[in-house]
Image (cartoon, grey):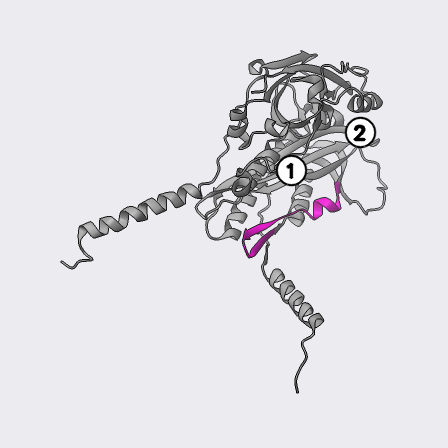
C-alpha cells in the first residue's frame, strides 16, 4: 500500500524532534554549595521578618555554553537557606515569611528583604580563558511603615580558568562568590552603627 | 637520514604552525577591561560637600577612556557614564544612596533643588519630572544591548558583565567610609544644553531621616 505524505504530520514530527533536541541540550547544574561559616558576634537585639520573595527563590543563570548546549544554574534554594542562616547569625529573633504567607501575627521591628541585583558570568572563547562569576544581592531593612531603615548591596565575585569541565568551574566560582557575598553581608550588618541604634543595642 | 627527518623540513613545518597558533591565540584572546581607579572625592574633577556628605564625580567623556574601561565608545551612542565617589565624613550617622535619587539635569533648564532636606517624596518626584531632562538613568543591561561596536559580537558578555557589576547600587555609607560606582545616563536634549549638565543627588541621613541634596555642575568638551 502506498502511503501519502502529509504536511501536518511532517511538521509535527519536526516540531517534536526539535523539542527533544532542545530539551536534551539543557544542562541543569546542581551545585553542591557548602554553608558559610560566620564569626561569633553580638547579635542585634531585634525581631525581624526575613521576607523571601518568589523572585528570590527562582533566581537562575542560563546561557549557551556551546552552539548546542545550554548551561543552567539554579541558586534559589541555596540563597534562601543561606539568607536564613545569615539573618539568624545577625539578629536575635528571625521569622521567615514568604510573599504568599498570611500577615504576621507577632509584631516585628523590621522586615529584611533580600533581592538578587545581578547573577552574571562571562564566557571566554576558549577553555584556557579566565571566567568570572558575579552575584550581587541587595539587603533592605524596612520599618513597620514600609520606609527603608537601612540598605546595602553586597557583591560576591570569583575568577578562575574556565577549563573543559564547565560544571566544575561553575561550582568553584559560585562557592567562592557565595562565601564572599554572605561573609561581607554579615560584616556590613553587624558593623553598622545605624542597625545597632535601631535595635537599641 | 630520510627526507622527512631533515632538520630544515621540521623547521619549515614548525614556523607556520607557530604562526597559526599565535594567530589563533590572539584571535581568541579574552577581552580584559581594567577596573576604574577608585579615587577619593578630593581627586575627582567635580565635587561637592555638605553636612558630612562628600561627593566627587568623573564623567567618562573621552572615547579612549570609555574604550579602555568599558570596551566601547559610550558617548558616541549618547550615553554618559559617570564615576561616583561618596564619602561619609560624619561621625554618627550613615547615609543611604539609591541610584534612582541621582538625576542629570540641564543647566539651561535651571532646575533648582526641590524642598531641600525635607525628605518630601512629592518634591523628589517633581524633581524627576520637571526641569531634569538632561539625561535619563539607563540600565546597564539595556546599554549592553545597543550595538555600540563590532566588539559587541565576540566580547559582548564581558562588556555586559562589566557594565552591570560596576553600577552603583543601593548602599548605606557608614561614618568614615567611602563607596564607588558608575551610573549611566542616556543624554537627551543636547541642542539645548550642549555639554553642560548638573548632577543632582539626594542621600538619606539615617539618624535624622532627612534627605541631603547636592548639585554638581559638569562640563566637558566633545571631541
In this view, A178 is above or below B40: below
Badge 1 crowding class, 10 Å Cα cut-off, few under 14, some 14 to 19, many 20 or more, is: few
The residue under the point 46% across, 52% down is A164
x then y, percent, for residue B158 = 54, 39
A23 with respect to B212 (left or right): left
Where is residue B185 shown, x and y percent of the image? 67, 27
Q: Is residue B121 left or right of residue A152?
A: right
* Label number found at residue A128: none
As helix, strand or loop, the secondary structure at mark 2 comes to loop
- Circle 2 packing at 10 Å, graded few (<14), some (14-19), many (20+), is few
Q: Quadrant of the N terminus of chain A?
A: bottom right
* Residue at horizontal 61 percent and vertical 19 percent from the top: B57
Chain letter of mark 1 equals B
* C-alpha span from label 1 to label 2: 28 Å
Q: Which residue is mark 2?
A: A147
Q: Tell me the chain of label 2.
A: A
Q: Quadrant of residue A48?
A: top right
Left or right for B108, reference B176: right
| Closer to the camera in the image, A92 or A174 | A174
Q: Nearer the viewer, residue B185 or A106?
A: B185
Q: Is residue B5 magenta?
A: no
In the picture, the quarter occupied by the C terminus of chain A is: top right
Q: Which residues are magenta?
A: A51-72
Is disc 1 in the same subunit as disc 2? no
Which of the labelled discs sits on residue B141, or is there none? Answer: 1
Observer-nearest of A98 and A130: A130
Instruction: Tell me if residue A39 can be seen.
Output: no
Quarter of the rendering containing residue B128: top right
A71 is within the stretch colored magenta: yes
Amino acid at each position: 500500500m502506498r502511503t501519502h505524505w502529509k504536511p501536518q504530520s511532517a511538521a509535527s514530527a519536526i516540531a517534536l524532534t526539535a523539542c527533544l533536541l532542545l530539551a536534551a541540550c539543557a544542562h541543569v547544574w546542581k551545585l553542591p554549595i557548602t554553608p558559610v561559616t560566620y564569626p561569633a558576634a553580638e547579635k542585634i537585639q531585634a525581631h525581624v521578618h526575613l521576607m523571601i520573595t518568589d523572585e528570590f527563590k527562582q533566581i537562575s543563570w542560563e546561557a549557551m555554553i556551546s552552539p548546542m548546549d545550554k548551561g543552567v544554574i539554579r541558586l534559589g534554594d541555596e540563597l534562601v537557606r543561606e539568607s536564613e542562616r545569615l539573618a539568624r547569625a545577625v539578629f536575635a529573633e528571625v521569622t521567615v515569611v514568604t510573599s504568599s504567607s498570611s500577615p504576621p501575627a507577632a509584631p516585628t521591628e523590621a522586615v529584611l528583604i533580600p533581592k538578587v541585583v545581578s547573577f552574571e558570568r562571562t564566557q571566554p572563547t576558549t577553555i584556557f580563558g579566565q571566567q568570572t562569576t558575579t552575584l550581587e544581592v541587595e539587603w533592605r531593612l524596612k520599618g513597620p511603615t514600609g520606609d527603608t531603615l537601612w540598605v546595602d548591596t553586597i557583591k560576591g565575585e570569583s575568577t578562575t580558568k574556565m577549563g573543559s569541565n564547565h560544571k566544575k568551574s561553575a561550582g568553584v566560582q559560585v562557592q567562592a562568590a557565595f562565601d564572599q557575598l554572605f561573609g561581607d553581608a554579615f560584616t556590613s550588618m553587624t558593623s553598622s552603627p545605624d542597625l545597632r541604634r535601631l535595635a537599641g543595642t | 637520514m630520510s627526507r622527512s627527518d631533515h632538520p630544515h623540513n621540521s623547521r619549515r613545518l614548525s614556523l607556520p604552525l607557530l604562526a597559526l597558533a599565535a594567530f589563533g591565540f590572539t584571535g581568541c584572546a579574552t577581552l580584559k577591561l581594567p577596573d576604574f581607579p577608585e579615587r577619593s572625592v578630593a581627586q575627582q574633577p567635580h565635587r561637592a560637600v555638605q553636612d558630612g556628605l562628600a561627593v566627587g564625580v568623573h564623567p567618562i567623556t573621552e572615547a579612549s577612556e570609555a574604550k579602555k574601561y568599558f570596551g566601547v565608545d559610550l558617548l558616541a551612542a549618547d550615553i554618559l557614564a559617570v564615576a561616583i565617589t561618596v564619602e561619609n565624613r560624619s561621625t554618627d550617622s550613615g547615609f543611604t544612596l539609591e541610584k534612582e535619587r541621582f538625576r542629570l539635569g540641564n543647566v539651561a533648564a535651571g532646575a533648582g533643588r526641590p524642598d531641600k532636606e525635607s525628605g518630601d517624596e512629592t518634591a523628589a518626584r517633581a524633581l524627576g519630572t520637571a526641569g531634569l531632562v538632561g539625561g535619563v538613568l539607563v540600565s546597564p543591561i539595556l546599554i549592553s544591548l545597543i550595538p555600540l561596536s563590532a566588539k559587541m559580537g565576540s566580547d559582548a558578555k564581558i562588556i555586559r558583565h562589566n557594565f552591570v557589576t560596576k553600577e552603583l547600587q543601593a548602599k548605606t555609607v557608614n561614618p568614615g567610609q567611602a563607596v564607588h560606582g558608575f551610573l549611566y545616563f542616556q543624554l537627551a536634549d543636547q541642542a539645548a544644553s550642549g555639554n553642560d549638565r548638573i548632577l543632582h543627588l539626594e542621600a538619606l541621613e539615617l539618624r535624622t531621616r532627612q534627605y541631603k541634596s547636592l548639585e554638581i555642575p559638569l562640563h566637558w568638551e566633545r571631541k
